[in-house]
């Protein structure tokens, strides 16, 4: 269920703020959203997988904290990011 290296590079290149950016809030949120989508799909078919459900809730909390940080720091980037990712909606 981990992200492949190619998919991770795609996410970094499409959400990076500058050329050498690999860990900005926007990139982290995009990667967490990808993991959340994959885990959600997994849990639709494996309803009794409670350990994965707990991991999903932890990832959602982490993304929520990053979104909150981005909202206070750069409101315009926050708005464009949630629009591109299709979250909060």
Image (spheres, rainbow, N blue to C red):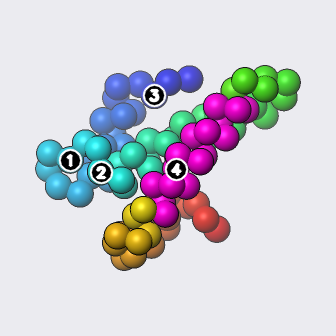
* Residue linked to disc 3: 3
* Residue linked to disc 2: 24
Where does residue 30 sit, x and y in percent of width and height?
44, 48
Q: Secondary structure at mark 3?
A: loop
Visible residue check, residue 85: yes
Residue at 51% over, 55% down = 65
* Residue linked to disc 1: 21
Direction from residue 64 to residue 20 in the image, left or right: left
Where does residue 35 sit, x and y in percent of width and height?
54, 36
Q: Which mark is residue 63?
A: 4
Q: Main secondary structure of the magenta part?
A: helix
Structural distance between the alpha carbons of marks 1 and 2: 6 Å
Residue stretch rendered in magenta on the structure: 53-68
Which comes sooner in the sequence, label 3 or label 4?
3
Which comes sooner in the sequence, label 1 or label 3?
3
Structural distance between the alpha carbons of marks 1 and 4: 18 Å
Q: Residue furthest left?
A: 19
Structural distance between the alpha carbons of marks 1 and 3: 18 Å
Where does residue 81 sit, x and y in percent of width and height?
43, 63
Q: Quadrant of the N terminus?
A: top right
- Residue 71 lies in the magenta-colored region: no
């Amino acid at each position: 269920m981990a992200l492949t290296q190619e998919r991770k590079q795609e996410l970094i290149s499409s959400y990076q703020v500058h050329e050498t950016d690999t860990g900005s809030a926007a990139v982290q949120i995009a990667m967490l959203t990808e993991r959340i989508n994959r885990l959600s799909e997994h849990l639709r078919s494996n309803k009794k997988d409670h350990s994965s459900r707990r991991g999903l809730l932890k990832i959602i909390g982490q993304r929520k904290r990053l979104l909150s940080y981005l909202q206070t720091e750069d409101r315009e980037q926050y708005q464009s990011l949630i629009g591109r990712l299709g979250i909060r909606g």
